[in-house]
């Protein structure tokens, strides 16, 4: 199936193709504009933060895909020195941004679902850059339209298990909607990195009553975060044919990621999260990888977006390892 989605994706984006130093290839030299066809990974932007505003958050995350690409063009090699993995030969593409429908969350979500499904149907992994976390409902819906058993891990300070009231979808509702509307079994969802003072007792009880495994930052600090993630990833793979990993950047302390919709004071280290992103890349079941809730209006020296690009490079190193092992 060729990729055709008029009025759904904005104009194509361009990355530099000239390599000034052949001994130092960069990610910006590997990404090509995508309009269908073979690719290992396709980048997709969701420039939408109306769900955040509806959840009484601070606006600005709609600017995240543009800010992310700007930093992506300035940093990031195609070699992972920690794992000795060269991913210069991955086929990387950028599909541009969803052409959102202003003031209409549901319609914007419909467009995202269609494009995610189109990318997956071409055999590529989707990497979504956002934007409000409400969009994860739409991207997971696109994943689940493949009719495979699905599981996923939300790496986030928040559960995002708020009820939908008066039909209003926002950034606090996606995982409750995934359970209720998409009928994802709770045993196939993990909430990972929850902050102690940001989630209500009722929402936590709702998640646990539905069989969701919930890991707080306090608990993860007392064990090994990376090992716990690996255990959950393997467990979900045994239950599912395809997985999604969604990283809300507010899982980090604001010292690492100040440019987010809801800054926090606790969280994992970049080193821990880099290894988690690499493990997600290795896992052949992972078809959707997200980096969400970035807000350039509040960033400091591109700190948040530089960290996000580091997570992307770690994930791509994992994908390269996955491809080598096939």
Image (cartoon, grey):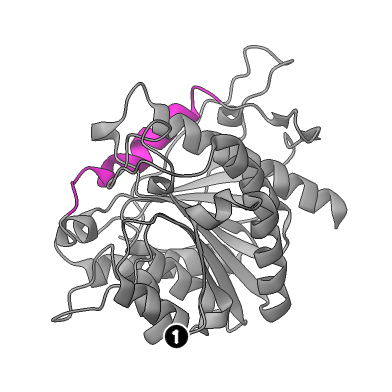
Q: Residue at x 54, y 38 (%)?
A: 269
Residue 2 in view (yes/no): no
Pinpoint residue 277: horizontal percent, then vertical percent.
62, 47
Residue 249 higher or lower than 55, as above or below: above
Pinpoint residue 178: horizontal percent, then vertical percent.
41, 78
Residue positioned most to the top: 21
Residue 303 in view (yes/no): yes
Secondary structure beneath dot 1 equals helix
Q: Residue at x 56, y 49 (%)?
A: 221
* 70 magenta-colored: yes
Mostly what secondary structure, the magenta segment? helix
The residue tagged 1 is 209
- 298 on left or right of 209: left
Q: How crowded is mark 1: few (under 14 residues within 10 Å), some or many (20 or more)?
A: few
Q: Which residue is drawn at 50% across and 31% down?
A: 15
In front of the other: 41 or 305: 305
- 143 on left or right of 227: left
In front of the other: 114 or 79: 79
Question: Which of the 4 image quarters holds residue 64?
Answer: top left
Which quadrant of the rendered structure holds the N terminus?
bottom right
Q: Residue at x 35, y 37 (%)?
A: 66
Which quadrant of the rendered structure holds the C terminus?
bottom right
Q: What stretch is highlighted in magenta?
A: 57-75
How many dots with numbers?
1
Residue 205 higher or lower than 13, as above or below: below
* 186 magenta-colored: no
In front of the other: 252 or 242: 252
In front of the other: 241 or 236: 236
- 117 on left or right of 106: right
Pinpoint residue 147: horizontal percent, then vertical percent.
58, 84
Pinpoint residue 75: horizontal percent, then vertical percent.
53, 24
């Amino acid at each position: 199936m060729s990729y055709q989605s008029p009025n759904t994706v904005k104009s194509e984006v361009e990355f530099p193709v000239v390599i000034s130093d052949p001994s130092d290839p960069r990610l910006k030299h590997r990404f090509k504009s995508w309009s269908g066809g073979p690719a290992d990974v396709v980048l997709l932007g969701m420039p939408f933060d109306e769900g955040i505003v509806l959840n009484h958050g601070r606006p600005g995350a709609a600017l995240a895909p543009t800010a992310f690409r700007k930093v992506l063009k300035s940093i990031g090699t195609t070699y992972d020195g920690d794992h000795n993995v060269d991913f210069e030969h991955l086929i990387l593409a950028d599909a541009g941004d969803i052409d959102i429908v202003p003031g209409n969350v549901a319609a914007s979500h419909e467009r995202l679902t269609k494009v995610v499904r189109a990318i997956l149907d071409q055999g590529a992994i989707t990497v979504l850059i956002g934007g409000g976390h409400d969009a994860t409902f739409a991207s997971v819906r696109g994943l689940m339209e493949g009719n495979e058993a699905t599981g996923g891990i939300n790496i986030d300070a928040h559960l995002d298990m708020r009820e939908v009231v008066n039909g209003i979808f926002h950034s606090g509702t996606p995982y409750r909607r995934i359970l209720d509307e998409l009928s994802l079994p709770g045993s196939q969802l993990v909430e990972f990195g929850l902050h102690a003072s940001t989630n209500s007792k009722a929402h936590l009880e709702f998640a646990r009553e539905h069989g969701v495994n919930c890991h707080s930052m306090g608990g993860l600090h007392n064990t090994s975060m990376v090992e716990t993630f690996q255990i959950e990833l393997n467990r979900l793979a045994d239950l599912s044919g395809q997985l999604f990993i969604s990283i809300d950047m507010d899982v980090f302390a604001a010292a690492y990621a100040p440019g987010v919709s809801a800054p926090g004071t606790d969280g994992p280290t970049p080193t821990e999260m880099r290894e988690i992103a690499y493990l997600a890349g290795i896992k052949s079941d992972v078809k959707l990888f997200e980096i969400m809730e970035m807000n350039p209006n509040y960033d400091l020296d591109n700190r948040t977006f530089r960290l996000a690009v580091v997570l992307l490079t770690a994930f791509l190193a994992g994908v390269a390892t996955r491809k080598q092992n096939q």
